[in-house]
Amino acid sequence: MHHRARTSLLTIAAIALGAPALAQGLDVPAKNLPVPQDVSPQVQKLIAAPLRNGWNVLPKSGEEWKPVADAGAEPTIRNLPGLLERMNVKVEKSTIDGVRVFMVTPATIAPANQNRVVIHMHGGCYVLNPREAGLPEAVMLAGFGGFKVIAVEYRMPPEAYFPAALDDGMTVYKNVLKTMNAKNIALIGTSAGGALVLQMGLRARQLNLPMPGAISSGTPMSDVTKVGDTFYTNELVDNVLVSRDGFCDAGTKVYAAGHDLKDPLISPVYGDYKGFAPTILTSGTRDLLLSNTVRVHRKLRDAGVESFLQVFEGQSHAHYLRDDTAPETKATFAEIAAFFDKHMGK
Amino acid sequence: MHHRARTSLLTIAAIALGAPALAQGLDVPAKNLPVPQDVSPQVQKLIAAPLRNGWNVLPKSGEEWKPVADAGAEPTIRNLPGLLERMNVKVEKSTIDGVRVFMVTPATIAPANQNRVVIHMHGGCYVLNPREAGLPEAVMLAGFGGFKVIAVEYRMPPEAYFPAALDDGMTVYKNVLKTMNAKNIALIGTSAGGALVLQMGLRARQLNLPMPGAISSGTPMSDVTKVGDTFYTNELVDNVLVSRDGFCDAGTKVYAAGHDLKDPLISPVYGDYKGFAPTILTSGTRDLLLSNTVRVHRKLRDAGVESFLQVFEGQSHAHYLRDDTAPETKATFAEIAAFFDKHMGK
């Protein structure tokens, strides 16, 4: 609201002065977006899906989010056995220093990956994808890349609030560091998870811990203050997040519980990336967070950090996690696995 | 038209069957896009500019394009002395095997670049930016990167038609190959130039010539058949190209002069990229050709080619060539120069 109010004042000033109204912005007429024909049938189906059901339902507390999260988790958990079978991956529940985790292990660990481990932070706006619903990305990396993955089932509202998710991730990272060289550890996450892995890198440096060997940050919620041009250009175009004022923003606010949203440990685009780990970033041309992805890429590159950006045709937010049979999904994980292999220790 | 007609039939079929109308696509309401605040003041000014004057004026012949090109060239040529001074670069007219070129030389050639040369193919929809109006990208690479550049003033309609521009580029490439290792040669171009440098790589292989050391393809017109999702999502959002049915499409059709637009030597996204040169790609989040850029990236990567993608916040088509004082422009050329340095011979 503050931002909008300021824009309006500038607009009035510009009109009063007769100047070209820079702050008025660009009026774009209504349009129809056909389903692109230059993507796989699987991705066409994802793009053709209607806007996410309930995108503008905005629970206001951890208690209100709980049933929403449970209902949303159901189809993902129902589909998990099929995914595990196709990926030839097994999952075991465990805890690490009190943090709930899933040990995600492929039937075949790639020879180069014997002494490597990847820590996974799931997405879901800090309130969604509880329990096994957080696992698809971890399972796909294990299956497509032949990596051992520790998927962190971090605490979420109403169980705990900021910085609980980050703390749980750091607890696991610190534990793994006891027995493994930092270079042999990678982090992966998408959406809130994509932000969390960036936050973990920034936090590691605050704590004088060594950087992991590599990080994969998929379409990160790197700026939850609604700054980023594709929050506007891809509004009602991205059929997953749909709007900067939608459910994901509501979930983040509940998690933040009043903490400053500009803190780099919530909006990591504002962090200092000097000496950061090599980082691969993934987005799509319809992604509401395309700007938040490319802005992190720019920050990393300006800080002299190795960083690789991949952007997929027509995809909305995190579409690459939706269908493991899509060739685009395989390409996504092939890039991530190759990037990890290039930068991690052996 | 053919594509649209098919979509309509599918739509009718879907409605008749009562099925979810996949081919109907997504209806996006009218919206206002504020000028993003997370870019430099220089880029804010570019983004705030109105839609390109005359974007929907569609000259139909080389003769009709000539006065349009001459008028458009004037402001660029007027600004060239200032650019040359800021970049500390000098330009000399010459010819190479009958092809008109400009030799673009920085006051200081970087030590690593003494035995390297870059061939530049300018943009302008194959009909615009005649004479010195084609030089800004060449001058910026020379100035920011410390490279010697040969800027090809290739023939355009009404002087000549497809494949004249490509042929002129190849003539220069073949000439330079006589005295220099292919690995010490790079190609750079934006828009039509971004397509031409891809076409040159593909053509080099057809002719059994060695690949250049590296290629920079900025927001390439890699698919002039109007396939690409951002032709729709960024329609009337990109304030430079504006629309897939605008002036640039008209210019390309005049140049193609009836040749098949799906030929990889006009729409290089359809080429075979196995063994292609390492390629850096540049685009922006509002770029009408963002899809055509990321699709080439994907093609290159799927073919196992080194390729780096950079996408700039809020920028429309080739905004990075508009203001050499913008930090984003410096970042663009710093990436290109570093990529060239990494992959070229010494």
Image (cartoon, coloured by chain):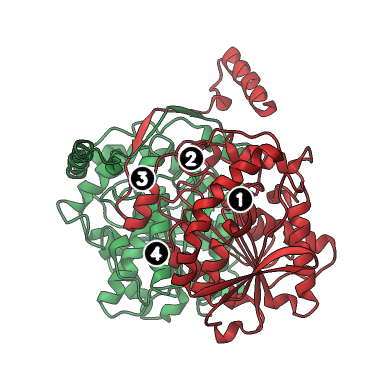
Chain colours: A green, B red
Mark-to-mark CA distance, 4 and 3: 17 Å
Question: Which residue lies under the disc numbered 4?
Answer: B325
Mark-to-mark CA distance, 1 and 2: 16 Å
Relative to A323, A182 lies left or right: left
Viewport quadrant of the N terminus of chain A: top left
Question: Could you tell me which chain the residue with mark 1 belongs to?
Answer: B
The residue lying toward the viewer, choosing from A295 and B235, is B235
Question: Which residue lies under the disc numbered 3?
Answer: B48
Relative to B163, A238 lies left or right: left
Q: Where's residue B3, x and y in %?
A: 67, 29
Task: Look at discs 1 and 2 and give the one toward the viewer.
Answer: 2
Question: Which residue lies under the disc numbered 1?
Answer: B295
Q: Which disc, if any, is residue B234? A: 2
Question: Could you tell me which chain the residue with mark 2 belongs to?
Answer: B
- First reached walking from the N terminus: tag 1 or tag 4: 1
Instruction: Indicate the quadrant where residue B113 lies.
Output: bottom right
Q: Secondary structure at mark 4?
A: loop
- Tell me if label 1 and label 4 are in contact, CB under 8 Å: no
Q: Secondary structure at mark 2?
A: loop
Mark-to-mark CA distance, 4 and 2: 26 Å
The answer to whether residue B19 is above or below residue A183 is above
Q: Which disc, if any, is residue A34? A: none
The answer to whether residue B130 is above or below residue A16 is below
